[in-house]
Image (tube, rainbow, N blue to C red):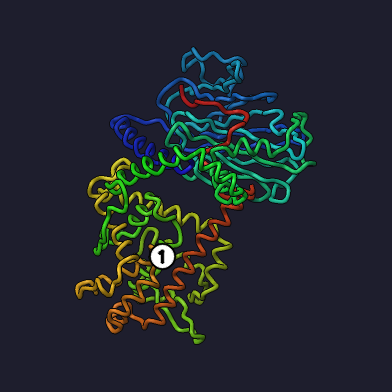
Amino acid sequence: MNRLMKIFAALLSVAAFVSLSDFSYGREVSSVDSISITAVLSGDGSAAVTEVWSVEIYEGTEWYLVRNNLGDIEITGLSVNGDGRNFENVGEWDVDRTIEQKAFKCGIVTKREGCELCWGLGSHGKHTFTVSYTMTNAVKSLNDYDALHIQFVSPGIRPRPQKISVTLKSENQSFDEDNAAVWAFGYEGVVGFEDGEIRARTETPFVSDQYSVILLARFNKGIFNSGSVRDVDFAELQETAFKGSAYQEYLDSQDEGFSPWILFAFFGLCAVFMVWLGFVVVRRRNLRIFGVKSLKEIGFFRDIPFRGNLLEAESVLVQGSVARSGGGIAGAMILRLLQNQYITVANNGRKKVDIVLDGPASPDSLNGTMMELYRLLESAAGADRILQEKEFPRWASRHSKEIQAWLDSVKSEGSGNLREDGYTEGGRFLPSGQEQARGVIGLRKFLKEATLINERKSAEVVLWQDYLVYAALFGIADKVAEELREINPKAFEEVVGYDYSTFHRVIFLSNHYGMSMTKVVSAQTASSVAGHGGFSSFGGGGGFSGGGFGGGAR
């Protein structure tokens, strides 16, 4: 479910860009450039919240924030400073006043479900508003832990924010993995512990009205003495928040505790659903990407699809659920770096080879994710620029954020290339894109299933380098290398530039480094699910206080 939501969000991103481009032509456009929120938690469980909004507005007379689902939380002490001037708090706010009447004033609209924090724009154009208020009982006292579960940024804000950061800190206590845990929902980004604080930040703009920022934090007893007491365990709050989230998706994928009888009953009850899933959902996906109902309809393909663009081929494999993003693309790129002489290999005297980051070709000519991968290898190699077998996995284990960032860039650059090269439009594969996507599956079948010795053609020798790179992408480089060598050992060594034993070791290293990336990301996922910080989940987060829907200029 979380994957579908991300795909839906990506499609909305394209649609939003197109509509925004049309709407903005010839006129000034409103925007929320950044939101910075800091909540300082007191010993009594209250939160002193400060929000800094950097905006450019050309519509409406006021700005408002929705704060519903408050329960026993009260909002007090509202103050606003705009462009260096303190605003007058008028108490109950009148939304029908003019922009001039609202200038340099703020107030609260009280509603049955909560309230709205409001202030006047004063004028259209660029503004920086600093808003401060206190939320009593923000921290709840539970049976086993204390907890905070608040939606700090609501969905439906207009204009949609570009960049958001939220910081939680205590007046007299540092937060870390030993005394707290944290999860984030509603956005694509990260959350974690930094310098004794809990910090969350978005990594993509809000592209639909479904985006928000929700934090769920768990604290050990003794940090707070909140008067808001709930007779529940933290696990109950967590279970509600995890529903529909990437965290729960991960936990479900790890669950091996079902008995055979439970599984039998489950599949019996869900037989109709599984049939629908298999014959409708998969068929629609195949038709959308490949233009065929079943991948079995695709035959062997001997040419290189997408004009050799590895990122586009990787995107097809992932979108088509043929493979997971990760180690294959890294291994394929390492082989391509070797073939193009950005890196070399050297015998280390122990019947093994090392990767050397001083090839004849200058890395300055690289760009995008290929350059980023080179920099990761370079950083792992250290001052001697020689990357030994165990060096990269050790480095990767300490730099999970850089690894995840690289994998994210692979995903975004791949989908971007498909769009820029005219293979997709609005997230939809065009006929030319479907043809090339079938080529990816066909080449995979050819390299994986065909006996290359029987299929050989003299003209295909020029494709051997590409075959080996794509075989690494498909996870079968060792098999393909062995078969190509058997066709013509001399030609093989001339094509790859190394003897077979050396190149076989190179294949092992490229695969080893690629798999170490996926292991690090998997470990980071487990850490995020455990509340130690890491990625946020777009879905889930239910049961929060505060927030609501809407906000922004009106």
Residue 203: horizontal and vertical position, in percent? 48, 45
The picture places residue 205, in percent across and down from the top left corner, at 45, 40
Q: Which residue is mark 1?
A: 475
Residue 492 lies in quadrant:
bottom left
| Point 50% across, 72% down: residue | 381
Q: Quadrant of residue 459?
A: bottom left
- Quick one: 204 or 415, which is closer to the camera? 415
Residue visible at 36% across and 53% down in the picture? 315
Tell me if residue 539 comes above or below residue 111 in the rendering: below
In the foreground, 165 or 380: 380
Residue 379 seen in the figure: yes
Q: What residue lies at 73% left-to-right and 40% top-to-bottom?
A: 171
* Towards the viewer: 4 or 365: 4
Query: At 75% from the left edge and 29% from the top edge, which residue is drawn?
Result: 228
Question: For this view, does 311 lie left or right of residue 42?
Answer: left
Label 1 packing within 10 angstroms: few (<14), some (14-19), many (20+):
many
Q: Quadrant of residue 523?
A: bottom right
User: Can residue 536 be seen from the camera position used here?
Assistant: no
Q: Is residue 128 left or right of residue 71?
A: left
Tell me the element at label 1. loop
Q: State the image coordinates of residue 34 (x, y, percent, origin top left).
A: 49, 38
* Residue kind at label 1, given as amino acid type: Gly
- Compared with 124, 269 (above or below) is below
Viewed as shown, does residue 310 lie left or right of 115?
left
Provide residue 237's location: percent of width, then percent of height: 66, 36
